[in-house]
Image (cartoon, rainbow, N blue to C red):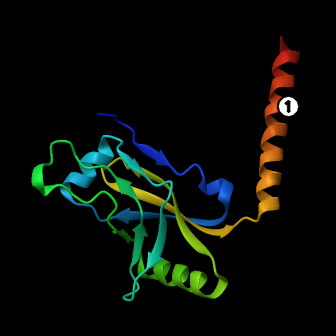
Amino acid sequence: MQKNINIKNKRARFDYEILDTYIAGIVLGGTEIKSIRLGKASISQSFCEFNELGELYVINMQVDEYSHGGHYNHKPKAERKLLLNKRELKKLRKEVTTSGLTIIPLNLFINERGLAKVKIGLAKGKKLYDKRETIKDRDNKRNLSRIKKDFNR
């Protein structure tokens, strides 16, 4: 079993402009936390939504079934409740409803106390030209680092 679990959403920063971040707890069953501790989770296609009661849920988060779970195993793509303060939930809900922003999970990790946490971001979707600009900047940085590396030899 791995010591340090840090599952990232690599597409998030490419597809979205992150405006604000929060750390949220996540409600999990027994076999779900065991699978996450083994690193068998993915948040690449997931997003967050509010339900009628004002609770925040992460949707489409893939947590593979635990290999030794038996018939008590969990569903791999179940909705999972996120735990935040009431003040933070109100602020996020207001931003989502008024500004048309979205909430996406950025990474899933286990803290020092052994609890699963999700870093979520309040995000604005990028346009196609913004994505092209991001690709161009990344290529320029890569080329510049190659030139610096060759120059230092």
For label 1, the SS is helix
Say which residue appears at 56% left-offset and 86% top-offset.
94
x, y (%) of residue 2?
34, 34
Residue, far left? 71
Relative to residue 51, is residue 34 drawn left or right? left
Residue, far top? 153
Say which residue appears at 36% left-offset and 42% top-offset.
39
Name which quarter of the figure residue 53 lies in: bottom left
Say which residue appears at 52% left-offset and 83% top-offset.
93
Number of disc labels: 1
Q: Pick the residue in front: 17 or 131.
A: 131
x, y (%) of residue 24?
42, 65
Relative to residue 98, is residue 5 drawn left or right? left
> What is the crowding at mark 1: few (fewer than 14 residues within 10 Å), some, or many (at least 20)?
few
Can you say whether 114 is above or below 79 in the image? above
Tell me which amino acid carries mark 1. Answer: Leu
* Quadrant, the N terminus: top left
* Quadrant, the C terminus: top right
Residue bearing the label numbered 1? 144
Can you say whether 81 is above or below 96 in the image? above
Relative to residue 43, is residue 33 drawn left or right? left
